[in-house]
Image: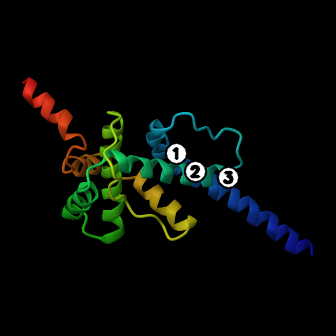
Amino acid sequence: MVAVSLKKKGSRRWQRARDARLAAELAPLWEELRVVDPAVELAGRSPDVELYRMVIECRDWIRQLRFSMPDSAWDEAVIAARSFAPSGRNAECIATAGWISAGLESFDRSERPVPPSPAPPTGRDLDDEIEFLVRVSQVPDLDVERVRAKIPSAMPAIDEQHDSVR
C-alpha cells in the first residue's frame, strides 16, 4: 500500500514537471497568438490546467485566423514547406508556423473575408496536439519567413490600394 502511494506521488510529480516543461515550450507560440485575444490570462493555474488552456486557446486563435486568410493560404503554405522540408509531419509544422505568421499579419488589418479558409490540421488527441503545437513553436524564423513569403496577401484590396498610390 505504501509503495503504491509513493508510486502515485512520484508519478504526479513527474506529470506536473512534464506539464510545466511543455507549457514553457509552448509559451512562445501562445504569446505570439495572444494578440488575437489579449484579454486571456493564465495566471494562478496548476501546470496541467495551464497547459490544457494554452493548447485550447492556441487552437481557438488559429481557428479565428482562418477568417483573415485567402482560400489558397493553407495549400500555398504546405507547398512552400514541402519544397525544403519534404517529410510529412515536419512540413506540416513549418507550414503551420508560416500560415500563422501570415494570419497574424492579416489579422492586424482587422478585415474578415467570409467564409473562413482552410486551416492547419489538429492533433488526434490532447497529447498529439501538444506535441504538434510545441513543434510549431520551435520552427526557426527563417523557415517561417520562407513559407510566409509564398502565401498570397489575405487583403488584396488593401495591397491594390497601396499599388495605385505609388
Q: Residues within 10 Å of mark 3 (few under 14, many from 20)?
A: some
Name, please, the residue furthest toward the front: 114
Where is the C terminus found, in terms of image quarters? Answer: top left
Q: State the residue position of label 3.
A: 49
Q: State the residue position of label 2.
A: 23
- Residue at 85% across / 67% down in the picture? 6
Seen from the viewer's position, the closer of residues 119 and 136 is 119
- Residue at 45% across / 64% down in the picture? 122
Query: For the residue marked with disc 2, what is the amino acid?
Result: Ala
- For this view, does 130 lie left or right of residue 92? right
Are circles 3 and 1 on residues that touch, CB within 8 Å?
no
Seen from the viewer's position, the closer of residues 56 and 97 is 56
Q: State the residue position of label 1.
A: 27
**Mark 1 or mark 3, which is nearer the start of the sequence?**
1
Relative to 129, is 166 above or below?
A: above
Question: Residue 44, percent across and down?
Answer: 71, 40
Q: Residues within 10 Å of mark 1 (few under 14, many from 20)?
A: some
Seen from the viewer's position, the closer of residues 131 and 117 is 117
Query: For the residue marked with disc 1, what is the amino acid?
Result: Ala
Are circles 2 and 1 on residues that touch, CB within 8 Å?
yes
Q: Cα distance, mark 3 to mark 2?
A: 10 Å
Q: Quadrant of residue 42?
A: top right
